[in-house]
Image (cartoon, rainbow, N blue to C red):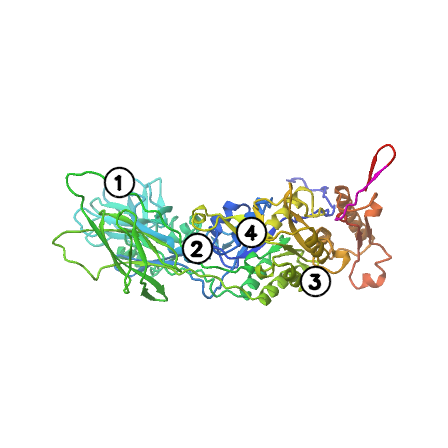
Amino acid sequence: MYTTPGVYFETVDRSRPAVGPLRTDIAAFAGYAERGPLFVPVKVTGWRQFVATFGAPLPDGYLAYAVRGFFENGGAACHVVRVADPGAAQTGAVVLPGSDGAPSLRLFASYGELHDAATDAPQVDAGRPVRYQNPGAWANRLSVSVQPASLGATRTLGSQPADGLTSYVAGLSGFQVGSVVAIRQQDASVPEYRRVDAIDPHRKLITWDASIAGLGALDLSKDFDLETVEFSLFVHLDGQIVERHLGMSLSPEHRRYVVDALRVASNLLDVEVLVDWEGGAWRIPDRWPADADRVPLLGGFDGLATVDKNDFLTALDALAKVDEVSLLAAPDLVLRPTAPTIRPRAQTEILPCKTLEPPPQGRLRGIAVERRGDTDVPLAGVRVQALESALPSLLTGSDGMFTLEQLPVGRVTVILKRDAYYDTEVTAQSRLVLSEDPESPNYAIPFFMVPIELPPALLLDDIFDVQDAMIRQGERGLYRVALLDPPPEMLSLEDIQTWRARFDSAYAALYYPWLVITREDSVEAAVRSDVIQVPPSGHVAGLIARTDLGEGVHRAPANDLLSGVKALTEIVDEAQHGILNPLHINCLRLLPGRGIRIYGARTLSSDPEWRYLNVRRLISMIEEAVEDASQWAVFEPNNQILRQALTFSLNGFLNALWRQGALAGDAPEAAYQVKCDEDNNPSAVVDAGQIIAEIGVAPTIPFEFIRLRLGRTVEAVEVTE
C-alpha cells in the first residue's frame, strides 16, 4: 500500500497466452438408463459414479455396457445423456398428509447436485442447488418414513417481561432463529406455538415473532416449558434405509428448512411444501407431516416405449453445448429389444423349531394394482410369495386380491411377480389372527406394480438420420468425431457394405462387428445367458482415449488389445478384411495369440487427404487449440507487432507437436509452416478488420502395410523392408 504521494512503477507481464494442446480423450454417450436427469449432460469419471448416477444396466439397453467398456479400456472421463420420451416419463412421488389429513409435503424423485458441464461448478439458482426431476420406474422402489423430532428443550427462569415479546430461559442448546417452539405450562393441556425471531446467547434471551402475553391460559409469572418442533425423514430403497435427514423444519428461516436440507443433502428426493406458510399454517401442529412408516413413492414410469429419433436428436443438441467432447457415440440407437426373463427369487429357508405352544399366526390381505393416471386397476395372475412363510406362492384373482395366512405377526416381506411387470418387493405389517375376529374382506393393502417398458426398434432410416446428425456436429465446427455402430441386421458381409455406403465424411468412423461381453448382473446371469452382444462404440472410445492419453492424438488408435471382450459376433478373416478395409470399415479381429484388436483407423471420407482417423482428429485438435488460444487477438491493433506475436505463439505450439512425433519431417521447416506477414495481410485485408495466418502441417501417416522381402545371399539370409 502506498502512503507517500509520488510516481511509482509496477512490473506487468504483457506476454500473450501460449497455444497449448487440448484434451481429446473425452467421450460423450447418449442412451437409455434406469434413472438420472433427462437430456442433461452429466460428467462421469468412473464406472461406480455412473452406476450411482444412472443405475444398474437395463435388461435391454447398451448404454451402461458401453460406458463400462469405455472405462475398462482406459477412458478417463465422459459425458452421459439419458434418453427417454419426456411426455411419457413420469417421476415417482408421494404426498405426506398432516395429522388433519390435508396435504403437507410432496416428495418426488430427484437427481442430486449437478455440476455445470463447462465450468464443473455446482449449478445454483437463487442461491440454492439446481435439482432435476429423476423420472423412471426405479422411484417406485423408494419409500419414506416420518418421525417427530426436537432439537432443543428448555425452561423459563422466573418472572418474564410483561410484554411477552421475549423470554429468559435456562439454556439455548438446539434453539435457533426460525425454530418453531411448543410452549407448555403445567396446568395447560394443549401447547401454544411461536417462532424464534432472535436469540441473545449472553443473556439467554429469546425474542418471539409475536407476543406470548395472553396466549391461551399462559401465566407469565410462572415457569413454562419450551420445546422446538422438528421432524426427521428416512428414505428407504428396496426396504433398506439409504438416507437419514434429521431435525428438519417447515420454517424457511430455520437452518434445517426442509427444502434447503433435502436439496443439499439428498441424492434421491426433492420436496415441495404444501403448507400455507404466509397464512400462518405453521402454527397449527396438525398441518405438519404426520408420523408415517414406509410410505411408497408411486407413479414412476421410464418413458421408453414411445422413444423416437427426435428424442435422440434432443440428446445430441444437449451434447452440442459441451465444448470438451471429442468422441460421440449413441449405442442404444441400434437397440433391438427382447422381452426380459423374470428372475426367480430364492425363498428364505424356514428353520424348524420346537415350541411348547404354536406361535401366533398373522394374516396379510392385499391387492395388486397398476396405477394408470389417477386410477388404480387391479391385476390378475400376479404371483405372490411371502419370504417369511414356508407356504407355496399363490396367484391373485380377477379382482387382484390375495390373502397370505400363517405368517409371523409383524413385518413380512412380500414378493410380487408378473410377466411384463417389474418385480415388486414390499415390507408390510401382518395382522394377528384371532378366532373370534370376523373377516375383513374390504381391508386390503395396495401393492403397486409397474409395467416394464421396452424401447422400440428404430427404423434404419431413423438410425441413419441420428447418426448423420452426430456427424454434422463435427462438420459444423464442434471438433468431434462420431463413432458409428452398425444396426444388428446389417452385420453380414454384404449388409455392412450397404450400410457404409450411406456415409461420406471425415468426421465419422464405422466399426465392425459387434462384441460379446459378460453381463453386469450376476444374479440375472444365472437365469439368462451370462454374455450379451453389444455394439462396439463404447469399447472403441475407451481405446481411443487410452491412446490419446498415453501417446497422443496423432497416434492411430489401432492394433491395440480391447479389454473386457470375450468374443466377436462375426469372425473377419484375411479375405473379408481385404474387402472391408478399402471401404474404410474398421474391422475388429480375433488374432491367434494376440487377442481381439482393432485393425483399422480410417474415417468414412472418400477424400484421400482425410483417410485416416488420427489425421482428422489431430487437425481438429490443432484448429480448436489455435481458436481458443487466439481469442486475445480480437480488437488488438492490426500491425506488425500483432502478426509477429501470432507467428511466435503458433510456431511454439507446432514445434512442440513436432518434437512429440505428431508431425512428419526431419526438421521443423519440413513439418510445419506459419505465414502471417504483409504478403498475406495486404492493406485491403487490414482495412476490412481482418488478419490472416496461414498454417501448414505435415501430420504423420500410419503404416497400414509393411512389406518384408526375404532373400538369400551366398553367406547369409537377408531381410529388407
Q: Position of residue 193 (x, y in %)?
A: 27, 53
Point out the frontmost of discs 3 and 1: 1
**Residue 718, located in which quarter of the rendered image?**
top right
From where the camera sits, is residue 116 visible? no
Neighbour class for label 4 at 10 Å: few (<14), some, many (≥20)? many
Q: Which residues are magenta?
A: 704-712
Closer to us: 602 or 609 = 602
The amino acid pointed to by label 2 is Ser
The amino acid pointed to by label 3 is Asp
Q: Name the secondary structure under disc 3.
A: loop
Q: Position of residue 307 (x, y in %)?
A: 50, 64
Q: Position of residue 237 (x, y in %)?
A: 38, 49
Point out the frontmost of discs 3 and 2: 3
The mark nearer the N terminus, 4 or 2, is 4
State the residue position of label 4: 66
Residue 351 is marked as: 1
Q: CA distance from mark 3 to mark 2?
A: 42 Å
Image quadrant in which the C terminus is located: top right
Q: Is residue 549 left or right of residue 141?
A: right
Q: Name the secondary structure under disc 1.
A: loop
State the residue position of label 2: 110
Q: Name the secondary structure under disc 2.
A: strand
The amino acid pointed to by label 4 is Ala
Neighbour class for label 1 at 10 Å: few (<14), some, many (≥20)? few
Q: CA distance from mark 3 to mark 1?
A: 68 Å
The mark nearer the N terminus, 3 or 1, is 1
The amino acid pointed to by label 1 is Leu
